[in-house]
Amino acid sequence: MRNRELGTAGEDAARRFLEKQGYKIIATNYRSQLGEIDIIGEDQGTLVFIEVKTRSSNKFGSPAEAVTRKKQQRLHQLAAMFLIERQLDNMPVRFDVLSLTKTGNRVQIEHIPGAF
């Protein structure tokens, strides 16, 4: 499976997982000139910006380890833009990471609420 296909499959699995957990999905693949936020959802009145990382193995570390400090800073900037655009400045926010490892037909999901 190619990287793009793996990533798309991971984001689809992540969205289904979050919906089962009671999250309301607000947006997927929110883009601006700074980059992209994979999933934006709402969890019990908190706006949650979710980074999804999918790998086919943990050979080079867990998928969550790929969310570097630089990536976190970019996500903070993107989230600020989203909040301003949607006039949601006063809403509480959180940043989660969903780490998915897909081996064959099996997907292992680790959800890290408030990851950064």
Image (spheres, rainbow, N blue to C red):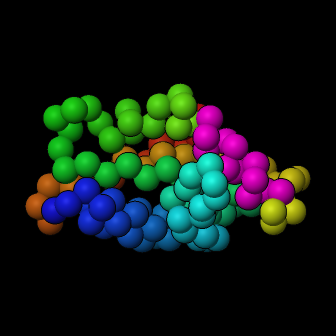
Q: Residue furthest left?
A: 104
Point out the residue furthest to the top here: 69
Tell me if residue 102 can be seen: yes
> Residue 3: percent from the left, percent from the top?
25, 56
Q: Total number of numbered labels? A: 0
Vertical placement of 22 versus 46: above or below? below
Is 61 drawn above or below residue 7 in the view shown?
A: above
Residues rendered magenta in the picture: 73-84
User: Does the stretch in magenta take in 29?
Assistant: no
Residue 6 position by quadrant: bottom left
Q: Is residue 85 left or right of residue 8?
A: right
* Quadrant the N terminus occupies: bottom left
Which of the image's four quarters has the C terminus?
Answer: top right
* Residue lying at 57% horizontally and 36% vertically, measured from the top left: 72
Q: Which of 28 and 41 is in front in this view?
A: 28
Tell me residue 66's x, y (percent): 38, 36
Residue at 73% x, 58% y: name it.
Answer: 82
Q: Left or right of 71: which side holds 7?
A: left
Pinpoint residue 2: horizontal percent, then vertical percent. Answer: 20, 60
- Asked which quadrant contains residue 103, the reply is bottom left
- Judging depth in this view, the residue of 43 and 101 nearest the camera is 101
Q: Does the magenta stretch include residue 76?
A: yes
State the residue at coordinates (62%, 35%): 73
Instruction: Name the outermost residue toward the front.
Output: 33
Instruction: Please tell me whether the stretch drawn in magenta is mainly helix, strand or loop.
Output: helix
Q: Residue at 27% of width from left, 66% of height from top? A: 5
Query: Is residue 106 visible in this depiction of the protein?
Result: no
